[in-house]
Image (tube, rainbow, N blue to C red):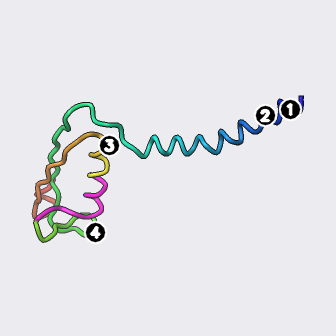
Amino acid sequence: MGYYRFIIGATLSVGSCLLPKAIISSVSQPPPPLSPPLTVTAAVPRYFPPTYSVDSQGNPEGFAIDVIEAVAKRANLEIKYEIKENWSDAV
């Protein structure tokens, strides 16, 4: 009886160590896209650091852009940005 308790305990211990790693590795990698990405247009203000700004080449950058790009990658979306001069134009 003690042998079976040892086997069950060892199995649960090893499983509890490996399961979170398996879950994290499967969650951290987005699945391959099944279809071409859908294009979504996002209006962003030209200057609202650190959330939004525009680099020297006119491309949007900042924290919100990083978040949008990460979500778009997982959702199989392509984001087309429209740079607006202020919030009222963006909304």
Q: Are marks 3 and 4 in contact (CB under 8 Å)?
A: no
Alpha carbon separation for disc pair 4 and 1: 60 Å
What amino acid is found at the position of numbered circle 3 in the picture?
Answer: Arg
Using the image, tell me which numbered label, if any, was put on residue 50: 4
Alpha carbon separation for disc pair 2 and 3: 40 Å
Q: Are marks 1 and 2 in contact (CB under 8 Å)?
A: yes
N-term-proximal mark, 2 vs 3: 2
Which quadrant of the structure image shows residue 56?
Answer: bottom left
Q: Are marks 2 and 4 in contact (CB under 8 Å)?
A: no
Tell me if 24 is positioned left or right of 51 in this view. right
Compared to residue 46, the image places residue 32 above or below, namely above
Which quadrant of the structure image shows residue 77?
Answer: top left
Alpha carbon separation for disc pair 1 and 3: 46 Å
Q: Are marks 4 and 1 in contact (CB under 8 Å)?
A: no
**Residue at 19% across / 35% down in the picture?**
36
Q: How many marks?
A: 4
In this picture, which residue range is highlighted in magenta? Answer: 58-68
**Magenta span has 63?**
yes
Kindly identify which residue carries mark 2: 7
Kindly identify which residue carries mark 1: 3
Tell me if 72 is positioned left or right of 17 in this view. left
Indicate the secondary structure of the residue bearing disc 4: loop
Label 4 environment density (alpha carbons within 10 Å; few <14, some 14–19, many ≥20): few
N-term-proximal mark, 3 vs 4: 4
Q: Residue 78 appears at what percent x and percent y?
A: 19, 45
**Residue at 53% across / 41% down in the picture?**
22
N-term-proximal mark, 2 vs 4: 2
Kindly identify which residue carries mark 3: 74
**Residue at 35% across / 37% down in the picture?**
31
What amino acid is found at the position of numbered circle 2 in the picture?
Answer: Ile
Alpha carbon separation for disc pair 1 and 2: 6 Å
Indicate the secondary structure of the residue bearing disc 2: helix
